[in-house]
Amino acid sequence: MTTVANPIYDTVFKYLLEDERITRTILSALLKEEVIEVETKRDEYSNIGRDNLSVFRIDFGAKIKKSNGDIQLILIELQKTWLETETLRFRQYLGAQYANKNNMRAEHRGAYAIPLVTVYLLGHKVGDIEEPVLYVRRKAFDYNDRLVEKGIPDPFIDSLTHDSIIVQIPRLQGQVNNKLDKVLSFFNQTGTDQNNKQMLDIDETAYAGDNEMLRILRRLKSAVSDAKIRHEMNVEDEFFSVIESRDTDILMRDKTIAEQNATISEQSTKISEQSTKISEQSTKISEQSTKISEQSTKISEQSTKISEQSTKISEQSTKISEQSTKISEQSTKISEQSTKISEQNTMIEEQASTIRTSIQILHKSGMSAETIAENLNMDLLLVKRYIDNNIK
């Protein structure tokens, strides 16, 4: 076993890529095509992000040899990060690449962009994806999802799209099956020194006979004795310690906020439920009030009708009372008239009785009915009736 500097550190990674041959080896393994020439873009070494340590970015111009022997110029944007980083930051870098006029080339049909490949070396896992290395490639399809190959690649399409390679460093498990596995084995953190994570313990016999891998091994080994690199690694550790401490505080704060939000949410739910109940009760009360109002209106209408009927009955009672008074007065008059009539009848009967007696006396004295009728100025038949009644 041999001890080498950990290339996960930005300063070590930068030191490693300052060797143009090693850069070609690493990029060739990632691209799975031979990189015959590589140039680091001017001023493109940069630490960008939270506390200037979140993302380490390097841009390359590279000539690759295709399987058919053609030489192609491409741009490679390599970004390395320890921490989970917002994808917006990566998109901003890409936007800068697409907007850079220096990344265009003249074609017979106009100016088109140099094909771009993005490489992400991530110090964290991406969701539930278990594959340590992901290749995201452009494909063109027709409406029926059939692969379009004629005319592809095309500079217009290449100017607007790009391929990506994503490496999840925590997913590297030390299994070496190909050239890329060998290159990435230097980033496998399972070999980190237990007492010093700045160092990796590497089994150099695994690279016996492979000059390219041994060159990488020697480069990382030489970084161990470089005082400047060691100092910069210590600075990175200090900064990340501060970041981790801050992140812990943020996590605790976020946890507290989350708990408070959960409590507020529960209270809001209860308040909402209570509001719903109150609303339902208010609706019921409103409905009951409406019913009561309707009933009150009906009662009022009925009262009005009863009042009107009472008024009519009162008026009718008054009329009946007046009629009764009139009837009573008429009854009194009739009674008085009946009394008078009775008295008159009595007087008539007395007069009739007197006349009858007189007629009977006269008849008994020998006076004829005709003479009596003539003397009394009475109807002969009536006189005879009085005489006959006496006979009877």
Image (spheres, grey):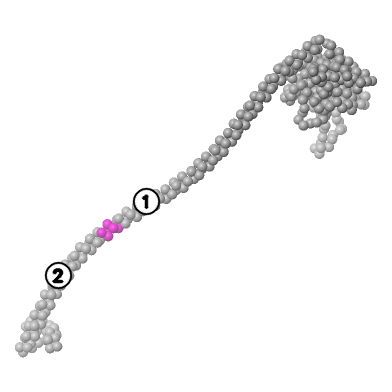
Q: Residue at x 39, y 52 (%)?
A: 302
Q: Is residue 331 left or right of residue 354?
A: right
Q: Is residue 87 magenta?
A: no
Q: Residue at x 51, y 42 (%)?
A: 281
Q: Is residue 323 left or right of residue 141?
A: left
Q: Nearer the viewer, residue 191 or 144?
A: 191
Q: Is residue 132 above or below residue 226?
A: below
Magenta stretch: helix, strand or loop mostly: helix
The type of residue carrying mark 1 is Thr
Q: Position of residue 276 (x, y in %)?
A: 55, 39
Residue 262 in sight: yes
Q: Earlier in the sequence, mark 2 or mark 1?
A: 1
Q: Which mark is residue 340?
A: 2
Which residues, given as a range, are shown in magenta? 316-321
The type of residue carrying mark 2 is Lys
Residue that carries the numbered disc 1 in the rendered image: 304
Q: Quadrant of the C terminus?
A: bottom left
Q: Is residue 275 left or right of residue 11?
A: left
Q: Quadrant of residue 154?
A: top right
Q: Secondary structure at mark 2?
A: helix
Q: Residue at x 89, y 21 (%)?
A: 203
